[in-house]
Structure formats: C-alpha cells, structure tokens
Image (cartoon, rainbow, N blue to C red):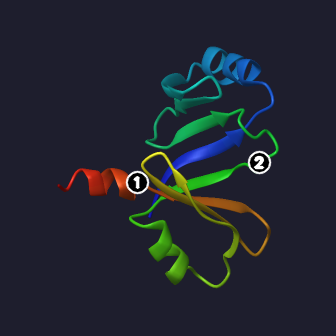
Amino acid sequence: MKLEFLYMPTRDLSGALALYRDGLGWQEAWREGESTVVLALPGTQVQLMLDATDPDAAFGPIFVVGSVRDFLTGRPSELQVSMEPVAIPGGFMATFQDQSGNTIYVLDQSEDAAAGTG
C-alpha cells in the first residue's frame, strides 16, 4: 500500500491552478482531459490531484494497492466501504471511510499489469 495522491475536488480548477501551480510554484505533472490536473509536491513523491469532475467528492488520500478486490477482502474492520470497486482506466478503485468519517481512496492498476504480462 503506497500513498500516491492527495485528492482535492474543486469547483474552480482555474482558480486552484492559479493558487497551487502559479502562486506556490508546484509543477504540473500530468492532466486527464479538461477536469483533472496533477501537481508534483516539492520534497515528496506524493502528488496533488485537482479534480473538477465531482466537486462534491471528499478530499482524501489515494493509496495504490496491488488489487482493490484483495484489499476489500482483507481490509481492517474500522474501514467501512462507501463505494464498492468500480472500473477506472487501467484498473479499479474503491472508497472507504474510517471511524471518524474521513474518506480513503484505494486504487489499483491491475488491468495495466495484466495487459503487460502477455
């Protein structure tokens, strides 16, 4: 399990980029369409994912695991499933809440890995 991103939904992607990229000087790492921009955080391998797709989604960490389905089966009892695994480009993602209601995202790239083993 590796912390890969801090997920930050936004209603104003341009304003968020003006602050984090232009104001704080964080470097743009990559984009997905017109609604998601990922910024490299200085001094760490963790990246900030700004996303305008669902501005009402919860801020939270995104952890990468080998298999979301295996993680779901063996998850700590304190984590309650708030979204069952769904297909995403290259794999699957699920969402959990901890005992305090904080959102935790877990994703894998199992479909990409499976495609590379042929």
Of the residues under marks 1 and 2, which one precedes in the sequence? 2
> In the depicted view, which residue is nearer to us: 46 or 51?
51
Residue type, mark 1 in image: Gln
| SS category of the residue bearing label 2 | loop
Quarter of the rendering containing residue 26: top right
Q: On the rendered structure, is 92 left or right of 104?
A: left
Q: Quadrant of the C terminus?
A: bottom left
Residue 23 place in picture, x, y as percent: 67, 16
Determine the CA span between mark 1 and mark 2.
22 Å
- Image point (50%, 22%), residue name: 27
Identify the mark at residue 57; answer none if there is no mark. Answer: 2
Residue type, mark 2 in image: Ala
Residue 54 place in picture, x, y as percent: 75, 41
> In the depicted view, which residue is nearer to us: 37 or 40?
37
Identify the mark at residue 109; answer none if there is no mark. Answer: 1
| SS category of the residue bearing label 1 | loop
